[in-house]
Image (tube, grey):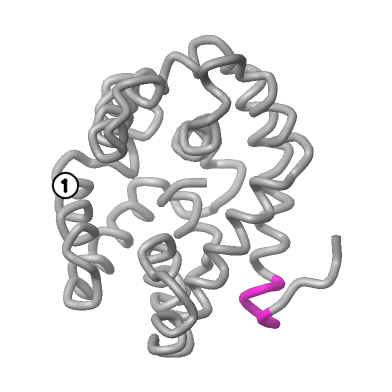
Amino acid sequence: MNHLAHVLLAGPHPDHRLGAFLGDHVKGTAALDALPPEIARGVRLHRKIDSWSDSHPAVVELRARSGPGWRRYSGVILDVLFDAMLVRNWHRYHAVPLATFAREIDVLLAARRAELPARLVRFSIWAREVGLWTRYDERAMLDDIFARLAARHGRPGPLADGAQLLDRMAPEIERTFREIFPWLQARARTFVENGRVTAS
């Protein structure tokens, strides 16, 4: 899952959403423990979601079917494409319209900018300017996202061509997303409420 899915799965609490957005940028136990408790809970949830998603049999199978040359980066690519699937299927998973939810994200990130690392500040400004949250499923936007990822990783391919995986496997990707996302929602709700998940 990528940014949009992580923020949605974090629930309505602003600190949980901020922690979900920070997720990958908080390294180590000391950095996590230094955060306010509810932001830390959002970061922990982000990490759990990544683990749950990556280890789900349907995702493991989808990555295996991506084919030679794709498998190494298929996890990163699918994270982005799952956000595209979330945009396409938004009405199934949240009662608030996507445009309204997108404004909530932009307002939160602007208000809490001082708590973001510089790279996320730049990203949040870019996301607002281009209308990222409502455009994740547009081909031009996906190409731009994958070009940025490739530049950051220093890997022109296959990351730069990530949208081609959608061309090849759109039905399988959407089917997998629709299988796992309600499951992730249920587990995320339990984690936010209890700080842990014991049920499968």
Q: Residues within 10 Å of mark 1 (few under 14, many from 20)?
A: few
> The C terminus is located in which quarter?
bottom right
Where 52 falls versus 129 (above or below)? below
Magenta span of residues: 190-195
Q: Main secondary structure of the magenta part?
A: helix
Where 90 falls versus 106 (above or below)? above
- Furthest-top residue in view? 168
Which of 154/180 is in front?
Answer: 154
Horizontal and vertical percent position of residue 195: 66, 81
13 on left or right of 44:
left
Please check the rendered image and state whether residue 137 is part of the magenta-colored stretch, yes or no.
no
Horizontal and vertical percent position of residue 152: 26, 40
Which residue, given by chain and number where applicable, does mark 1 sit on?
126
Q: Residue at x 66, y 20 (%)?
A: 172
Q: Residue at x 27, y 21 (%)?
A: 140
Horizontal and vertical percent position of residue 183: 73, 51
Which of 55/4 is in front?
Answer: 55
Q: Residue at x 67, y 36 (%)?
A: 178
Indicate the quadrant where residue 34 lies: bottom left
34 on left or right of 58:
left
Please check the rendered image and state whether residue 191 is part of the magenta-colored stretch, yes or no.
yes
Local secondary structure at mark 1: helix
Q: Amino acid at mark 1?
A: Trp
Q: Residue at x 16, y 47 (%)?
A: 126
Where 103 falls versus 14 (above or below)? above
Horizontal and vertical percent position of residue 91: 55, 41
Which of 126/131 is in front?
Answer: 126
Q: How many marks?
A: 1
Where 70 falls versus 118 (above or below)? above
